[in-house]
Amino acid sequence: MDPGITSGVAILDSRGNILDIYSKRDMTRAEIIRHILRFGNPVIVSTDVSVTPSSVEKVATKLGCVIYSPHAPISLSEKRELTKDYCHSVKNDHEIDALSAAIKAWKHHRTLFSRVDDALKKFGRQEIFAGIMPKILKEESPNIEDAIREFIEKERQPIEVEKMSKDESIQRGLIEKLQKKLIEKQQLIDSLKNQNILLSKALNEIRKEISRLEESRLKIDRTGDYQELENSLDYLKKLRRIESKGYYPVIELEKIDLDLIEQINDGIDLDGRVILVDQKEKLSLLNDRNVKCLLTLGEIDSGIENLEFPVVQIDSNMLENFDDIKAVKIDYIEKGLADAKKSGLIGWLKGYRKRKD
């Protein structure tokens, strides 16, 4: 293995066959380990320098491998010699360094590999080569055959679960935390999706409610129009009843206002009506309404010559109430109109004659 910004990895089997040569920039330790394990169970991790880099040590520890470091750094000329038969397989210096280290380690241990392989053939257990090699390389057994017997004996014993190392425990805990967070995030996503669906439904319901209220408002407006019309008809009926009793109904106005006049005219029609106004301003707005007359309870003001309708002075005791509507006897009004004509106090005479014509 050649660590660095760009890491190089070369993998050989126990017979010196090249299984893989690989390099990649910014490759993490976990990526290196996963890549190695794709090809089997490693027994030795090697480097091309005499002082083992810490990253190589960490990979070897994770894999449970023996580390091989040469007594002196492998020289450039030796690297060329070691890799000359594989120049077509390497792409860069990192792969050359990794392959040189792997070949150097294999050559150093090939005799041992061969002896172990022969001994395993006697036992008919070649498949345990990767499992037994670390013990032999670490010289934990006095000889190869004893190591094989001990390994086979342990296989027959109940398997005890080894305690995880501190690093493994931390890594396992980290993985569990990340998995928990992933589940929580997924649950949050699902919850937000459900909320989105509910909000969409609520929005549709609100839109429907707004549409319903708009329709209701239109109905209310129309109902209001009908109610206003109905009230006008009721008022007209009251006016007719008053007239049938020999009275002129009096339309009371606090002041003359164009909008108000339009509204009243639309409801009951001011043509031929008797009007009583508190304020005497803007009386000329009644000129084109063809009213019968304007009543006044006080002295007739000057400046009425611009009016095109008669002004009749009456006493307050002449006013009577029928269903909250004031009224004056027809005789009083007709006499008042006659008196007004005789006295010449009607500046509206010219217009009045035009209307009569």
Image (cartoon, rainbow, N blue to C red):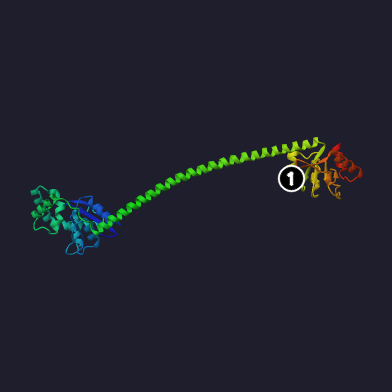
Q: Residue furthest top?
A: 244
Q: How many other residues sit within 10 Å of disc 1, few (<14), some (14-19) or many (≥20)?
A: few
The answer to which of 173 and 278 lies nearer the viewer is 278
Residue 64 shown left or right of residue 222 in the figure: left
Quarter of the figure with the N terminus: bottom left
Q: Is residue 63 visible?
A: yes
Q: Is residue 15 visible?
A: no
* Residue under the image location 91 percent in, 45 percent down: 343
**38 sits to left or right of 145:** right
The image quadrant that residue 25 belongs to is bottom left
Q: Secondary structure at mark 1?
A: helix
Q: Foreground: 239 or 145? A: 239
Q: In the rendered view, does 245 fall on the left or right side of 207?
A: right
Image coordinates for residue 218, horizontal then vertical, percent: 62, 40
Q: Position of residue 298 (x, y in %)?
A: 85, 49
Could you tell me which quadrant the C terminus lies in? top right
Disc count in the image?
A: 1
Residue at x 22%, y 60% (from the top left corner):
57
Which of the 4 quarters of the picture holds residue 96? bottom left
- Which residue is labeled 1 in the image? 260
Q: Residue 107 location in percent, x, y? A: 14, 57
Position of residue 333 relative to residue 156, above or below, is above
Residue 311, position as x, y percentages in the image? 85, 45
Which residue is at a point 10% across and 50% down the rendered structure image? 120
Q: Is residue 178 above or below residue 264?
A: below
The amino acid type, in three-letter code, at marker 1 is Leu
